[in-house]
């Protein structure tokens, strides 16, 4: 083969760029499935198309091909034709039966090699004398070697067809992409003179994506590579990867993958590099021109951060500002969630502020696209300003002594609410009204200093009322205790029971003495009354058991006497019918009989009515074997 180079190697950047080209002889492709942007067509003397100068100029200009017109000497073709005939003869092997076949075969092989050498020699000479057309003109080439002349001609065609390849003035690859994503947002690679590297290539890629964005289409990485690795660019994939990565890092492009927004902050450096460089992502990675955030919205976000979080954003990058805002918002949400637990026990002020504040801050965390985030915060800035104004004193409330003052006031009001049915005191009611006015205010912080004085007044007045209410309760407890001891002193087991009975009445009395709630205080009288009935019943049960034991002993005694005297036991029982009779005692309080705590008597008929009802209750509790003990 005369031409050994199958690709053209672009001389810049150490042969970084190589270009394959279509190879055609006359109208016949040298190889199938050739679809490159440039080509080489050799026209032999046997070419049937027009070979005049005008036709060839037009063909080379329109077809993006280097045309090599060989001289009108077909000697190399005839040599090649003879070579192919001999090769066909040797392949058939039909005359193997001839005695001199092997010698003939060897002679033909020698002739075939000679024909091949002659064809190469004649073709090389023809190529040296050939006229070469490039881009509609006869090429004036400096090289003398045949292969070098063809490479020089293809090189000129490449420069014409890939005329935007020069937009790459600095070769870039994956190491530069990694370095770029690893550095700060202020990083940029510049050439001498201050211009950014590969600036024209960046502009063209951005312009192409912008055109699709204007038509409401997102552009895939595959589409970018298909366009910019072909004419008129001819970039390699490393170029395209870096250009896209640079535009993204610069903030000119917005990425989405599977419908989710990709930012410098929600993806790691390694994830971003893989997203741009790996072939499996060329269809998934979609991009569009990133709409710049309005400066007014940026200012609104900075102002909100200053008012709400008391920080100033030094970063100008939109992604960084958004992430910082969301981080501060998340911290404030955690803080509010801790405060939210305080409202489980007490009705502190500001619960609505906390709930509404968390809802507002959580809404900010939902945004992943900076443009939408900035627009939302700007639109809601008045709500954020209100939150900043309301939340600051609320934090001070929970962090200082106001919380404890407020809590004590609520405790006092809770006691009053539980006992107010039993209290009639104008002075106390006025104090309570003043305290309620303060604690029910949405913003009570300025009035909280008044609560300690009101609380002292409340406690003084309430204590007086409590003392008045406790006297009859303590007296009732003492009476119930003395009643139990009175009965107990008549029993043979008094020494074994006395300490326990006194201890339990003492517990009730101590509870009543310590009680600070009028409503609860009254229950201690009921507890003492119930305890009295229980102890009386307990003693009755002990007495009953003792009586039964005595009756059983009497019965055994009579049986023994009957055996000794010989008289039947039945006769003795008939003579003493009550000997085995045991009656139980039932203790009951008057309150349980009347089913009321008081009687209202207006006339004689009312007396008869209540007494009649009492009589019916008493009769209902009695039976033949029961002694009814009514405790008044």
Image: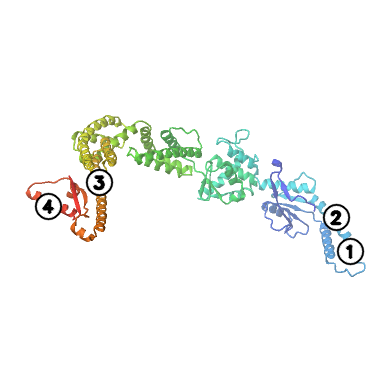
Instruction: Select label 4 or label 2 by which is in front.
Output: 4
Structural distance between the alpha carbons of marks 1 and 3: 142 Å
Q: Position of residue 218 (x, y in %)?
A: 53, 50
Under circle 4, the secondary element is helix
Query: Mark 2 or mark 3: which comes first in sequence?
Result: 2
Q: Residue furthest front?
A: 565
User: Residue 612's mark?
Assistant: 4
Q: Residue furthest left?
A: 604
Under circle 1, the secondary element is helix
Structural distance between the alpha carbons of marks 1 and 2: 19 Å
Quadrant in the picture for the C terminus: top left
Q: Position of residue 198 (x, y in %)?
A: 62, 40
Going 63% across and 39% down the picture, which residue do you hit?
Answer: 176
Q: Is residue 487 above or below residue 78?
A: above
Label 4 close to label 3 by CB (< 8 Å): no
Residue identified by numbered label 3: 539
Circle 1: is it few (<14), some (14-19), or many (20+) Cα within 10 Å?
A: some
Instruction: Select label 4 or label 3 by which is in front.
Output: 3
Give whichever of 586, 284 is nearer the camera: 586
Residue identified by numbered label 2: 117
Give whichever of 26, 403 is nearer the camera: 403
Give the side of residue 373 with respect to residue 505, left or right.
right
Q: Is residue 216 above or below residue 388?
A: below
Q: Name the quadrant containing residue 372.
A: top left
Circle 2: is it few (<14), some (14-19), or many (20+) Cα within 10 Å?
A: some
Structural distance between the alpha carbons of marks 2 and 3: 140 Å
Query: Mark 4 or mark 3: which comes first in sequence?
Result: 3
User: Residue 105's mark?
Assistant: 1
């Amino acid at each position: 083969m005369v031409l050994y180079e199958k690709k053209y190697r672009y001389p810049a950047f150490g042969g970084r760029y190589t270009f394959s080209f279509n190879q055609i002889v006359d109208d016949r492709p040298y190889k199938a499935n050739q679809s490159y942007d440039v080509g080489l067509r050799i026209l032999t003397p046997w070419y049937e198309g027009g070979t005049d100068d005008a036709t060839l100029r037009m063909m080379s200009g329109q077809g993006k091909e280097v045309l090599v017109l060989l001289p009108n000497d077909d000697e190399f073709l005839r040599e090649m034709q003879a070579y192919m005939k001999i090769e066909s003869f040797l392949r058939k092997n039909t005359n193997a039966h001839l005695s001199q076949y092997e010698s003939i075969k060897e002679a033909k092989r020698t002739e075939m090699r000679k024909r091949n050498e002659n064809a190469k020699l004649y073709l090389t000479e023809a190529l040296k004398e050939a006229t070469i057309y490039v881009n509609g003109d006869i090429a004036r080439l400096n090289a003398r070697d045949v292969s070098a002349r063809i490479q020089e001609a293809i090189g000129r065609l490449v420069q014409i067809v890939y005329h935007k390849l020069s937009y790459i003035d600095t070769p870039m690859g994956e190491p530069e992409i990694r370095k770029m994503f690893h550095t700060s947002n202020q990083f940029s690679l510049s050439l001498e003179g201050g211009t950014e590297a590969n600036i024209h290539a960046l502009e063209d890629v951005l312009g192409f994506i912008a055109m699709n964005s204007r038509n409401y289409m997102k552009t895939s990485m595959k589409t970018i590579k298909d366009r910019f690795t072909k004419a008129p660019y001819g970039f390699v994939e490393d170029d395209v990867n870096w250009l896209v990565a640079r535009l993204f890092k610069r903030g000119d492009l917005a990425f989405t993958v599977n419908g989710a927004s990709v930012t410098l902050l929600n993806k790691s450096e390694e994830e971003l590099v893989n997203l741009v460089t790996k072939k499996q992502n060329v269809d998934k990675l979609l991009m569009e021109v990133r709409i710049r955030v309005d400066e007014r919205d940026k200012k609104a976000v900075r102002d909100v951060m200053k008012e709400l979080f008391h920080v100033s954003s030094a970063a100008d990058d939109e992604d960084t500002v958004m992430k910082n805002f969301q981080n501060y918002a998340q911290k404030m949400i955690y803080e509010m969630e801790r405060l939210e637990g305080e409202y489980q026990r007490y009705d502190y002020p500001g619960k609505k502020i906390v709930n509404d504040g968390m809802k507002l801050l959580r809404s900010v965390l939902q945004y992943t696209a900076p443009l939408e985030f900035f627009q939302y915060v700007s639109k809601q800035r008045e709500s954020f300003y209100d939150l900043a104004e309301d939340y600051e004193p609320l934090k001070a409330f929970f962090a200082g002594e106001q919380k404890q003052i407020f809590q004590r006031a609520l405790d006092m009001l809770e006691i009053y609410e539980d006992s107010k049915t039993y209290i009639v005191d104008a002075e106390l009611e006025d104090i309570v009204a003043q305290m309620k006015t303060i604690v029910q205010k949405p913003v009570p912080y300025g009035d909280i200093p008044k609560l300690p004085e009101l609380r002292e007044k409340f406690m003084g007045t309430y204590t007086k009322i409590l003392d008045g209410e406790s006297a009859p309760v303590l007296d009732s407890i003492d009476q119930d205790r003395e009643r139990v001891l009175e009965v107990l002193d008549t029993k043979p087991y008094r020494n074994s029971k006395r300490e326990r009975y006194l201890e339990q009445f003492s517990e009730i009395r101590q509870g009543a003495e310590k009680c600070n709630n009028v409503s609860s205080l009254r229950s201690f009288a009921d507890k003492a009354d119930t305890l009295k009935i229980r102890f009386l019943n307990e003693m009755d049960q002990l007495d009953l058991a003792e009586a039964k034991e005595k009756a059983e002993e009497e019965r055994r005694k009579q049986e023994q006497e009957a055996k000794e005297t010989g008289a039947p036991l039945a006769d003795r029982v008939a003579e003493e019918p009550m000997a085995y009779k045991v009656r139980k005692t039932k203790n009951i309080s008057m309150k349980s009989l009347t089913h009321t705590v008081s009687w209202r008597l207006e006339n004689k008929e009312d007396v008869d009515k209540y007494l009649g009802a009492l009589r019916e209750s008493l009769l209902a509790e009695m039976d033949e074997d029961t002694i009814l003990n009514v405790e008044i």
